[in-house]
Each structure stands twice: as C-alpha cells, then as structure tokens.
Amino acid sequence: MNKNYVTLGEFIINNQHDFKYSSGELSRLINSIRLAAKIVNHEVNKAGLVDILGAAGDTNVQGEDQQKLDVYANDVFKSALINGEIVCGITSEEENDYITIEGKYNANDNKYVVLIDPLDGSSNIDVNVSVGTIFSIYRRITPLGMPVKKEDFLQKGSEQVAAGYIVYSTSTMLVYTTGNGVNGFTLNPATGSFYLSHPNMKFPESGNIFSINQGNYPHFPKGVKDYIKYCQEEIEDRPYTYRYIGSMVSDFHRNIIKGGIYIYPTSSKAPNGKLRLLYECNPMAFLTEQAGGKATNGFNRILDIQPNELHERSPIFCGSIKMVEKAESFMLKYKKG
Ligand code: AHG
Ligand code: MN
Ligand code: MN
C-alpha cells in the first residue's frame, strides 16, 4: 500500500472547509455512512458465500437471504445514522413513511435529513453480481427544535448538500460529492479503511456505452426506441457497446469511468418510470452534474423537479453530456404539447 494514499477520514477533515456550512456535522454524518458501508459490505460478501452454498442445497434460502439483506442494509444505515446522533430525520426506499428521531438525544436540533436506497440492485445478490447503496443529504427547512416534517424530505434535488453511493463489487467503493466535485474511495479489506483512489471523477464528454433494459423495448416511448436504433447504427463511432447490469449504481459507476449513458425511461407499463426520484434519481443526478455530465427526465433537469411524494418515480437519462443531449433530441421529436 502506497503510504501517500489519503484515507476517507483524512479527506473529510481536510476538505471540511470547502463545505459552505462547515460546522463539522456533515463530516460526522459522512463518517456514519462510511461505518454502515463497511458493515453492509461485510454482510453482502457473506451473502454471496451463503448463496454459493445454498445453490448446492436449499434454493429457497437465496430468495429469503436477498429479502433479508434489503432489510438488513436498511437497519444498518438507520442505526449508524441514529447512533451518530447527527440527523433529525431519515427516509428510505424500504420504509413506508419518513422517520423522525426522538428519544435518547435531542435530534430535533440537528440540521440534516438523509434519504437512502439501502440496497440497490438487490435482485443481483443471489447471483453474486454487484449491488450498491445510494444516499442523499439535505438541510431541513422546518425550524430547529421541532420534529421534522414531510416537506423536509420533499425538496428539489438542487437543494442537496451531499450525495453518494457505495458499490459492493470486485472491490468496494464509496463515491460522493458535497458540491465540490466527485471523489471515489476504495475499501482496503486488509486495513478496513477507504482510500482516495479516484480523485475528481469526471464523465467523459461522450462515450460508447449505452445502458437500458432493452427487454422493455416494445413498451418504450418512440424517442427512446429511435435513440436505441441510433446507438445500434453502423456509422461514425457507432454502433455503441451495450452494457446493462441491472443495478443502477454499478451501471452508473462503469459509465462515469468509461463514458456512457444510463436510461430508465417511462414505458407503457410504467408511465412514470421505475426509479425513485428521492432515493435514486436525485442523488445520481447530483453526482452526474458534479462530474460534468447531464441528468434529465428526457426533457427537464432532474434536479429541478419538485417532488410531491416520498416514493415518487421519475424517468432518468444520465451520463456523458453529449450522449444525454442526443437522446433528448430524439425525445423532443415526439414531445406532446
Ligand atoms: P432496487 O434494487 O433498489 O429496487 O433498484 C433496482 C433498480 C436499479 O438499480 C436498476 O437499474 C433497475 O432497478 C433495474 O430494473 P429492471 O430490472 O426493470 O431493468
Ligand atoms: Mn434502487
Ligand atoms: Mn433498493
């Protein structure tokens, strides 16, 4: 291990002053997420092992383990955030409603709410394919000293103060932004520390990878169908390479490094798309823009959407700026009204 590698802990302390509300609270919050990520990483790795054993014996265990892991990751992130005594509210893809934190400390005096997708791509767990966690952090808008309200969570993505993801894969990485670019840290399992391995991550302006579940092709809007045909055409630098893992975090992580576009559009079967605005689209859109890319719902900037519901869904087109703009141009051709 190169002695010059900066750990995530050091990086948080060194860069605290870059954050406009620099009070140390956000740093403590990211520390709680770092801790939860290590615990979930350990469990995800074990689950893979259990699945290998399960495949030779009791196949039912795999389905149950996968469900358990969703709940487990949710519990770990919730506990780490609550025990860190640093948030006033949490909402999660796995919860019906938002959680106000009452009890052992004066949580109502805390400034931040956290929104999480504790395990993203969880259908990949039983086949030992990479999964992730997505998190998004806002300052509360209701006054301090009171329990949080729904409106604290229903803020536009442009109000995020931090967002990031953890990808549990061949190596485990934590990638996050506090609005000053995107940095990636790799977990060294031997030392248990995350090290800055991918400083200042940027989407290449263009790329040659497109990621979309083409199984849904018959149900896609015409603009998306035309864009897929465009990607497949044999002209100039095309056809593009097609890659789809089925875990947004992993697909995004590949695309940010190599250059590409990730699309989860509307379809006749899912008129608002599948992905959740608060737990998936907004944090990934914030990271995308901070990495020099573009994230839209096909027509408008994701970060400008005013959410109305905690579990609201949105279509998303995100990645290398030129690729997203091209996809948008196809969408525009069929725009109604
Ligand atoms: P989650 O596991 O949190 O429900 O998210 C899964 C999401 C996303 O990660 C992935 O890109 C997408 O669902 C895959 O959906 P399809 O199987 O419909 O392509
Ligand atoms: Mn998800
Ligand atoms: Mn999930």
Image (cartoon, grey):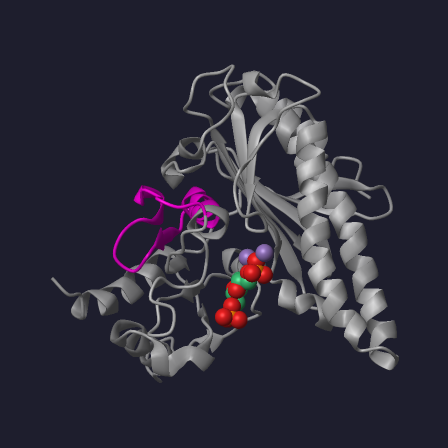
Q: Is residue 152 left or right of residue 124?
A: left
The outermost residue toward the left is: 337
Q: Say which of 240 and 216 sits in front.
A: 216
Q: Say which of 58 and 22 sits in front.
A: 58
Occupied quadrant, residue 82: top right
Which of the four quarters of the rendered structure image does ligand 2 lie in? bottom right
Which residue is rendered at x = 70% and y = 49% of the image? 73
State the count of labels. 0
x, y (%) of residue 232? 38, 82
Where 82 sits versus 91, above or below? above
Residue 157 located within the stretch drawn in magenta: no
Is residue 6 something that shows in the picture? no
Which residue is rendered at x = 67% and y = 63% of the image? 130
Where 107 sits versus 318, above or below? above
Q: Is residue 116 left or right of residue 32?
A: left
x, y (%) of residue 243? 52, 73
The quadrant the C terminus occupies is: bottom left
The quadrant the N terminus occupies is: top right
Is residue 210 something that shows in the picture? yes
Occupied quadrant, residue 70: bottom right
Residue 293 located within the stretch drawn in magenta: yes
Magenta stretch bounds: 282-310
Q: Is residue 168 left or right of residue 91?
A: right
Occupied quadrant, residue 324: bottom left
x, y (%) of residue 336? 15, 65
Which residue is rendered at x = 44% and y = 45% of the image? 310
x, y (%) of residue 10? 70, 28
Where 149 sits versus 252, above or below? above
Where 237 sits versus 277, above or below? below
Which residue is rendered at x = 47% and y = 26% of the image? 139
